[in-house]
Image: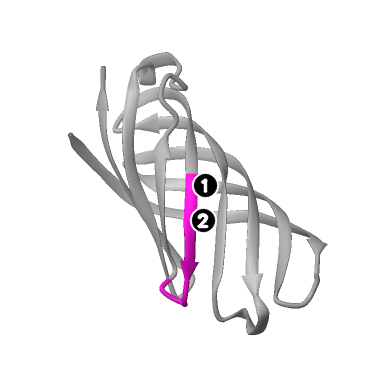
Amino acid sequence: MTRASGTFDINVWDAQEYDEREGAKLARVHITKTFHGGLTGTSTADIITAVAQGEKSMAYSGFERFTGSLDGREGTFVLCHFAGPSDGDGSLVWCVLPDSGTGELRGLRGAGGIVNDAGVHSWHLDYELA
């Protein structure tokens, strides 16, 4: 396994709440990002979020398509996200959807995570290429 790491910027966070009943709010969120470090490029993601009453805990899941390079290899791939339920720790896990890699990233497998530390998003991905 090889580890890549870096940061990303969120360019767009478009949340559409669809269920605001007592207990938790549910929303669909469309996100665009710019990656720096071992991943260099852009992505689009769509996630479903659940934020508990009082905004003390949350969870989400979704998918993200990355376009760019991983440690200098060009292509695209899809990440599967899962976070939560968290109680303010701001971390999540992700994995590469097997067989979703294209170009020089064909055969990519891996998993990692993201940490949100006071609005600074850092990531790591432990991966292998078949």
Residue type, mark 1 in image: Thr
Secondary structure of the residue carrying numbered label 2: strand
Residue under pointer 1: 34
**Dot 2 alpha-carbon crowd within 10 angstroms: few under 14, some 14 to 19, many 20 or more:** some
Q: Residue 9: which numbered mark, if any?
A: 2
Which image quarter is the N terminus in? top left
Residue 19 appears in which quarter of the rendering? Answer: bottom right
Name the residue: 80% across, 72% down.
21
Location of residue 75 with respect to 31 vertically, above or below: above
Left or right, 125 with respect to 80, comes to left
Q: Which residues are magenta?
A: 81-89
Which secondary structure dominates the residues rendered in magenta? strand
Location of residue 4 with respect to 17 vertically, above or below: above
- Give percent across and percent down for residue 112: 33, 47
- Judging from the image, the colouring scheme is one colour
Secondary structure of the residue carrying numbered label 1: strand
Residue type, mark 2 in image: Asp
Q: CA distance from mark 2 to mark 1?
A: 5 Å
Badges 2 and 1: C-beta atoms under 8 Å apart?
A: yes
Name the residue: 55% across, 62% down.
59
**Dot 1 alpha-carbon crowd within 10 angstroms: few under 14, some 14 to 19, many 20 or more:** some
Q: Residue 80: which numbered mark, if any?
A: none
Left or right, 67 with respect to 95, comes to right
Name the residue: 70% across, 76% down.
23
- Give percent across and percent down for residue 108: 34, 24
